[in-house]
Structure formats: structure tokens, C-alpha cells
């Protein structure tokens, strides 16, 4: 675990730039608290995960969800329970599309 620790603290300007970029991207919002700023997430973990996955699929698979899922299914060892859960999600999505 020791080798995973950063060698030194990041520079103040590095942290500031990162926070500014996250603010511009809409991931966090600053709130003044005395002389400092406190940053809050603007999206839930689920929303952030969904946005990241969609962006990844666009970049890595040209937005083709079928190819992305096919790749995952071929590369991952899924349990029968996980496969059942995926089947149920697909069936639910099909029912929603029919409405």
C-alpha cells in the first residue's frame, strides 16, 4: 500500500485548476465559506456513473451500445443471477419502448 501513496502533495494551483475544470464541466459547484470555498457534487453517484458510461460508449464504441454490451458479455464471467438480472432489465426496457 505504501507504494500507492503519492510522493508529495499536489501543488495548490493543480488542485485549483482541477476544481475549476470540474466546476466548468458542471460536476461540482463552489460555495463560499468564510475565506475558503466548499465544493459540492451537482449530480448523484448514479447520475455521474450514467453520464460517464454514455460518454465512454460514444468514444470507445462510436456510441454503439450493442457492441459495448457484446464485448462485456464476451469478456466477463457472469453468474447465472447476473445474467437473469440483465435479461430482466432488457425485458423491462422493451416494455417501456412499446408504450
Image (spheres, grey):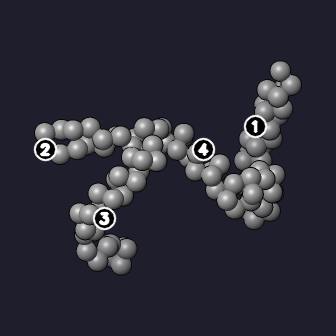
Name above or below for residue 5 compared with residue 91: below
Separation of disc 2 and disc 3 at Cα?
19 Å
Left or right of residue 90, residue 23 in this image: left
Q: Residues within 10 Å of mark 2 (few under 14, many from 20)?
A: few
Left or right of residue 96, residue 2 in this image: left
Q: Which residue is mark 2?
A: 35
Q: Earlier in the sequence, mark 2 or mark 3?
A: 3
- Name the residue nearer the viewer: 22 or 4: 22
Q: Which residue is mark 1?
A: 89
Whether the residues at callouts 1 and 2 have beta carbons within 8 Å, the answer is: no
Quarter occupied by the C terminus: top right
Q: Which residue occupies the extreme top position in the image?
A: 99
Identify the residue at horizontal 39%, vertical 43% (top origin). 28
Identify the residue at horizontal 52%, vertical 44% (top origin). 48
Asked whether the viewer can see residue 1, the reply is yes
Q: Which residue occupies the extreme left position in the image?
A: 34
Q: Residues within 10 Å of mark 4 (few under 14, many from 20)?
A: few
Separation of disc 1 and disc 2 at Cα?
48 Å
Separation of disc 3 and disc 4 at Cα?
27 Å
- Name the residue nearer the viewer: 76 or 36: 36
Q: Residues within 10 Å of mark 3 (few under 14, many from 20)?
A: few
Q: Which residue is mark 3?
A: 14
Amino acid at each position: 500500500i505504501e507504494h500507492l501513496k503519492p510522493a508529495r502533495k499536489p501543488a495548490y494551483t493543480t488542485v485549483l485548476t482541477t476544481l475549476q475544470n470540474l466546476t466548468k464541466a458542471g460536476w461540482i459547484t463552489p460555495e463560499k465559506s468564510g475565506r475558503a470555498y466548499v465544493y459540492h457534487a451537482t449530480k448523484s453517484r448514479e447520475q455521474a456513473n450514467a453520464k460517464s458510461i454514455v460518454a465512454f460508449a460514444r468514444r470507445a464504441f462510436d456510441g454503439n451500445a450493442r457492441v459495448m454490451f457484446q464485448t462485456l458479455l464476451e469478456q466477463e464471467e457472469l453468474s447465472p443471477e447476473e445474467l437473469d438480472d440483465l435479461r430482466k432489465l432488457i425485458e423491462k426496457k422493451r416494455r417501456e419502448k412499446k408504450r
